[in-house]
Amino acid sequence: MKKRYIEKNMTTPTPKCIPKATQERIARLAEQARQARAEPLTPARETEIKQRIKAELIRQDAVLVAHYYVDGPLQDLAEETGGFVADSLEMARFGRTHPAKTLIVAGVRFMGETAKILSPEKRVLVLDQEAECSLDLGCPAEEFTALCDAHPDRTVVVYANTSAAVKARADWTVTSAIGRDIVAHLASKGEKVLWAPDRYLGGYIQRVTGADMLLWPGSCIVHEEFKAEALQSLLREHPDAAVLVHPESRPEVIALADVVGSTTQMILAARNLSASTFIVATEQGIFHKMKQAAPEKTFLPLPTGGLGGTCMSCATCHWMKLNDLGKLSRVLETGANEIFVDEEIRRKAVVSIQRMLDFAGRRTDKAACPG
Ligand code: SF4
C-alpha cells in the first residue's frame, strides 16, 4: 500500500502521484456532489426558511460561520445573523472566540473538524457530511504518517485542507495566507520541510522561499483546472485587467498573476488595486464578496479546462455547493451532522494549529495574518 507513494530506485522515499484508485474516488465523489446539488428555492420559500433559521439560531444559541465559496444567500444569512464569512482558519478562530454554544459550519467537512479542534466544548454541526475536499481525500492519514516516519529529519507542515488525523501528525498547520511566511521562517533556521497535501501551493512556496521541501502530490480539483492558455487569451481581450490567482493553481497560471494570495488577500486586492477589471482564478463563490467589496469593478472568471477543453469542476467546488438553506434549516431542527474528533487526535492537532496562530499573533504585519 505504502509503496504506491514511493518512487523506485531512490534512496529517499518520495511521493510521486496520488494513486489512480484515489483519483477515481475523488472524481466520483465530486460528480455525486454535483448531481446532489439542490434546486434553487423560490423567493417565497427562501424567505420562509430564512425566518425559521433565524429563530432557531437564537433559540439554540447558535452562530453560522460560512466559507467564501458557499452560495451568496448563505454568506448573507451568516452576516445578517451575527455570524461570519471567511476562510477556514478565520472561521475556526471566529468560532472559538464567539460565545455561542453551537457553531454551524457552512463549508466542507475538514472545516467543521478544525472548528471542533479549536472549540472542543462547543457543539459543531456541518450542513452536509458528504462535503469533501480533494486535498483532504488525497492525503490519507496512514500513508501520510508513513511518509513522515520515513523523513524524521523534516519539519512537517500541512495545509488546513486536511483531516484532523493529518493535522495531528504535523508540526505546523498553515493557511495559504501565512504558509509562505512560516516556511520562510523554518528555512531561515535551516529546517527542511515535508509539505502536504497541495503540490501546487507547496511548489509556489518552494519557489518564493527557496526552502528544501518534499511535496505530497495532492491537488485541488477546482484550481488545477485553470490553464495558462485560457488566461493569456482572456488577457489579450482585457489587456488592462489585473490577474488574481489563488496559489492552489498551476505554476504557469501563477506566473501570470499580478497578485497571488489567499481568498481574503484576493478580496482585499480587488478592493485596493486601481484596476477596474479583474481576472480571477479561484472558486466562483468568491465573486459574491468581491462584488460587495468593489461594486464598481468588473470581475471575470478565468475559464477552466483550457481553450475549448472540458472541465470537471468548471471553477465550482461541488462539495461547497452542497451547503444550502434547506439543509441548514434541517440541521437546526434535527441536530444532525454533529462533528466529533477523537480527543487524542484533537489534542495533537490543536498543537500544530496553535503554533500557526501564535506565529501570526507575533507578527506586526497585518497582511500576513491568516485570511
Ligand atoms: S475548492 Fe478545492 S481546496 Fe477548496 S474545498 Fe473545494 S476541492 Fe477543497
Image (cartoon, rainbow, N blue to C red):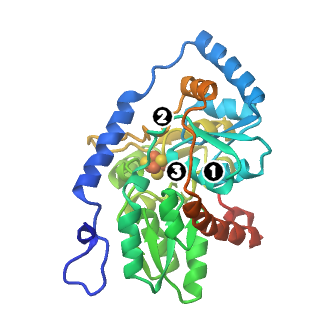
Looking at numbered disc 2 in the image, what kind of residue is underneath it? Lys
The C terminus sits in image quarter: bottom right
For disc 1, does the CB lie below 8 Å from ligand 1? no
Looking at numbered disc 3 in the image, what kind of residue is underneath it? Phe
Q: Looking at the image, tell me whether mark 2 or mark 1 is earlier in sequence order.
A: 1
Q: Looking at the image, tell me whether mark 1 or mark 3 is earlier in sequence order.
A: 3
For disc 3, does the CB lie below 8 Å from ligand 1? yes
How far from the left and from the top, in percent, is residue 150? 37, 81
Q: Secondary structure at mark 3?
A: helix
Q: Secondary structure at mark 2?
A: helix
Please indicate, yes or no, whether residue 85 appears anywhere in the rendered image.
yes
User: Which one is in front in this view, the residue at disc 2 or the one at disc 1?
Assistant: 1
Residue drawn at (19%, 78%), measured in percent from left and top?
8
How far from the left and from the top, in percent, is residue 333? 62, 24
Read off the residue under disc 2.
321
Please indicate, yes or no, whether residue 178 appears anywhere in the rendered image.
no
How far from the left and from the top, in percent, is residue 47? 65, 15
Dot label at residue 39? none
Separation of marks 2 and 1 at Cα, in angstroms:
20 Å
The reply to whether callout 2 and callout 1 are in contact (CB within 8 Å) is no
How far from the left and from the top, in percent, is residue 226? 38, 50
